Image: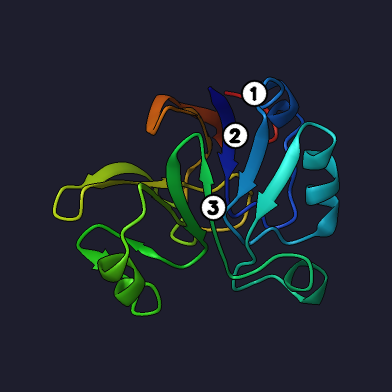
Amino acid sequence: MFRIGLLSDTHGFFDERITEYFGRCHEIWHAGDVGDVEVIRKLSRIASVVAVYGNIDGTPIRSRYPRHQRHIREGVDIWMTHIGGYPGNYDARVKPGIFEMPPGLFISGHSHILKVMPDKKLGFLHMNPGAAGRNGLHKVRTLIRFEVDQGRVGNVDVIELGARSSGTLH
């Protein structure tokens, strides 16, 4: 069993409560738009970080992380990218790969809209953790924590950090 903390679209903001929520995770995955390497440094103090760069990320993030991460954890084939879309509306940059070789779990960020939904046609799960930062149109900052075990994704927790403009829970 492998515990993962998933976030995206921090845009340089780090909520200290992430330490509490991801404290028991084996890895933390950042689905892009990190915004500042200091966010990665703080996440790395909690657990190992796997990340992709997003459209707002500059050279310090892009030189460290790729556009796509594809790896296997506990028998689950995982593909993470920043701009990927969702079931029925995949971005043109990922669509051919998704149809040619569907992952078991497809993770993207970018939209700032939290989604956990199956792609029934292709038979995999899609996750978008929403946005953990303060920039964007989202109203609530969110994270996802989940487990992969023996080829399955489970124990998915959606965590609300509070209003986009607030550093504290309301």
Q: Is any atom of residue 96 visible in this view?
A: yes
For the point 66% across and 27% down, which residue is it? 22
Crowd rating for badge 1 (residues with CA inside 10 Å; few <14, some 14–19, many 20+): some
- Numbered mark located on residue 5 in the image: 2
Report, in whole angstroms, how far the alpha carbon at label 1 lies from the one at label 3: 24 Å
Q: Position of residue 96 (x, y in %)?
A: 31, 76
Q: Nearer the viewer, residue 53 or 165?
A: 53
Which is in the foreground here, disc 2 or disc 1? 2
Q: Is any atom of residue 109 visible in this view?
A: no
Report, in whole angstroms, how far the alpha carbon at label 2 lies from the one at label 1: 8 Å
Name the amino acid type tagged 3: His
Residue identified by numbered label 1: 21
Q: Quadrant of residue 6?
A: top right
Q: Earlier in the sequence, mark 1 or mark 3?
A: 1
Q: Is residue 13 above or below residue 168?
A: below
Residue identified by numbered label 3: 71
Mark 2 lies on a secondary structure that is strand
Q: Position of residue 78 (x, y in %)?
A: 46, 50
Which is in the foreground here, disc 2 or disc 3? 3
